[in-house]
Image (cartoon, rainbow, N blue to C red):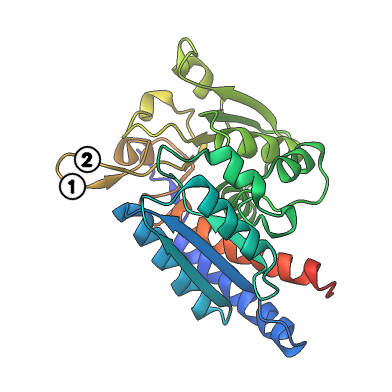
Amino acid sequence: MTTSAQVISGKVISEAVKAELRDEIAQVIAQGITPGLAVVIVGENPASQVYVRNKAKTCLQLGMHSEIHELPESTSQEELLAKVTALNNDANIHGILIQLPLPKHINESLVLDAISPDKDVDGFHPMQVGNMVIGNRSYLPCTPAGVMEMLKRSNITIAGKHAVVVGRSNIVGKPVAMLLLREHATVTICHSKTPDLGAITRQADILVVAIGRAEAINAEHIKPGAIVIDVGINRTEDGRLVGDVDYQSVLEVAGGITPVPGGVGPMTITMLMKNTLDAARTIHQLS
């Protein structure tokens, strides 16, 4: 008899976290500070525009101050850097987010490094990354932080487990591996050069998949009872939104799985809100 996996809903968990944040934000506002997030978007990438609107909407729902700075595709690197400097110096803004990708003529690393570490709520600044790796206080990258929050709130034991991360990006793969290690998992990172991927993923008690290839991981890659966190989001030729995991086949083998959509996605924006609140508290030295 096959049993279906527990579905780990990012929608449900993110609503619980947002309810807590709403109360905490109200307390900060009562002390005279409204946490403020500025999102800068360059060009007219439709997917980016949707993400930016969702971020602004969530800010307002939680009672935070939100600004969207829309710049044309032709914006020069100097103009963008000047915008970042202005936001670094803006007392109403506690978090700055540059929506990626940027146009090809702009050096992404240079722009991200220009954000004040105090306002780097995306957790991409080298200072934040370094602090995360050595275990110091830092703003955690939002998607990996969301993954960890889902595991903890689903009462999934991390310590002592073998966690396998498929993907090594600076945005998800590497930081989520570091955060799992911090929680005392034994961590293996796989990537496009890993031979016999299935031989390693089948050892995973916790499998985090972030490779950007639609339904690349199927039931044959899964150890029975494993927890599968699907970070991917891909649109198929027939218009469906799917993850990097073949959801239906893995559902029959795994112990727990995140759906796409409605899994990790909602958590990313929620953790961004948490980082912005934390930044406002830190900048103003509030308890």
**Residue name at image x 47 percent, y 35 percent:** 210
Q: How many other residues sit within 10 Å of disc 2, few (<14), some (14-19) or many (≥20)?
A: few
Q: In this view, does 107 lie above or below 19?
A: above
Which percent across, then down, holds residue 269?
51, 61
Q: How crowded is mark 1: few (under 14 residues within 10 Å), some or many (20 or more)?
A: few
Residue visible at 69% across and 36% down in the picture: 178
**Amino acid bearing label 1:** Gly
Percent of width and height locating residue 138: 76, 51
Q: Which mark is residue 105?
A: none
| One can see residue 123 in this view | yes
Q: Is residue 279 left or right of residue 213?
A: right
Please tell me which residue is depicted at 32% across the width and 55% down the height of the picture. 44
The residue positioned farthest toward the left in the image shown: 238
Q: Measure the alpha-carbon separation of dots 1 and 2.
A: 5 Å
| Disc 1, SS | loop
| Camera-side residue of 66 and 78 | 78
Amino acid at the residue labelled 2: Thr
Q: Do the residues labelled 1 and 2 touch (CB within 8 Å)?
A: yes
Image position, residue 134 (x, y; %): 82, 37
Residue 244 falls in which quadrant of the image? top left
**Residue under circle 1?**
239
Residue at label 2?
236
Res 275 visible: no
